[in-house]
Image (spheres, rainbow, N blue to C red):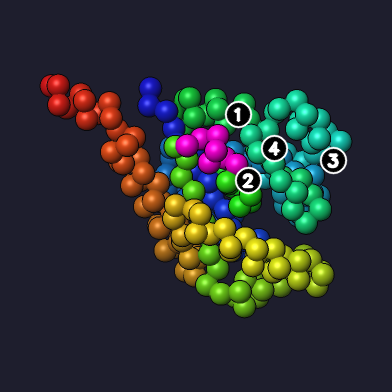
Amino acid sequence: MEKGIPIVISAPSGCGKDTILEQLFKINDNLVYSVSATTRAPREGEVDGQSYYFHTRESFEKMIADNEVLEYTEYCGNYYGTPKKAVEDMLAAGKDVILKIEVEGAMNIKKIFDECVLIFVLPPSIAELERRLRKRGSETEETIAARIKQARTELEFADKFDYLVVNGALEKAVEDVNTVILSEKMAAKRNAELLDMVKNS
């Protein structure tokens, strides 16, 4: 069975990556989502085990100590990380695994999975990003300022990613991300066996 591709999606908070992924899963049925673990409190409507695995700081640190996370980072005072076994199992089953993680984690995943694809979602502008954060209605002024500051830091890593997608119009952003994934599935470097089969037929 052909192994799946790990696909990392990173973006500053407020860029709409969750909405992009929600639509992406409707049009690409080989995608599965790697649910991240976090110590932050659930937002309204988030479900444990679907949105995130919500942990206490103590239990998350035990996962780190037991080598049960592929990568982790601390962001705005909370841990975020990728549980290891679930990802490895899904890739072995031939599924393309979406990992929605921060830029630091993306760099770490690249070291573990050389074959992974890194996609960075950009806002149309910092001003638009701030507008979207305010529209959420769940962020304090202090948190918004911290997220904008963090966004500027994350943008410094964007050129280390394989692809950049601007989320200006949602439909186009979804189409762009899916095009990247489909192109990668057809890349020569991933299809050596197919080429050999045709050459030897």
Q: Judge whether residue 110 is colored magenta.
A: yes
Residue type at mark 1 is Ala
Q: Residue at x 49, y 53 (%)?
A: 161
Residue 162 in view here: yes
Element under label 2?
Answer: helix
Q: Nearer the viewer, mark 1 or mark 2?
A: 2
Residue type at mark 3 is Arg
- Which comes sooner in the sequence, label 3 or label 2? 3
Q: Identify the magenta region.
A: 108-114
Residue type at mark 4 is Gly
Evaluate if marks 3 and 2 touch, with contact meaning CB atoms under 8 Å apart: no
Tell me the CA gap for discs 3 and 4. Answer: 17 Å
Mark 4 burial class by Cα count in 10 Å: few <14, some 14-19, many 20+: few
Q: Residue 57's mark?
A: 3
Q: Nearer the viewer, mark 1 or mark 3?
A: 3
Q: Nearer the viewer, mark 4 or mark 2?
A: 2
Tell me the CA gap for discs 4 and 1. Answer: 12 Å
Q: Residue 86's mark?
A: 1
Evaluate if marks 1 and 3 touch, with contact meaning CB atoms under 8 Å apart: no
Q: Residue 49's mark?
A: 4
Q: Residue 105's mark?
A: 2
- Which comes sooner in the sequence, label 1 or label 2? 1
- 51 horizontally vs 200: left or right: right
Relative image position of residue 115 (x, y in whole percent): 44, 37
Tell me the CA gap for discs 3 and 2. Answer: 18 Å
- 39 horizontally vs 122: left or right: right
- Which comes sooner in the sequence, label 4 or label 1? 4
Tell me the CA gap for discs 4 and 2. Answer: 20 Å
Element under label 4?
Answer: loop
Q: Judge whether residue 27 is colored magenta.
A: no
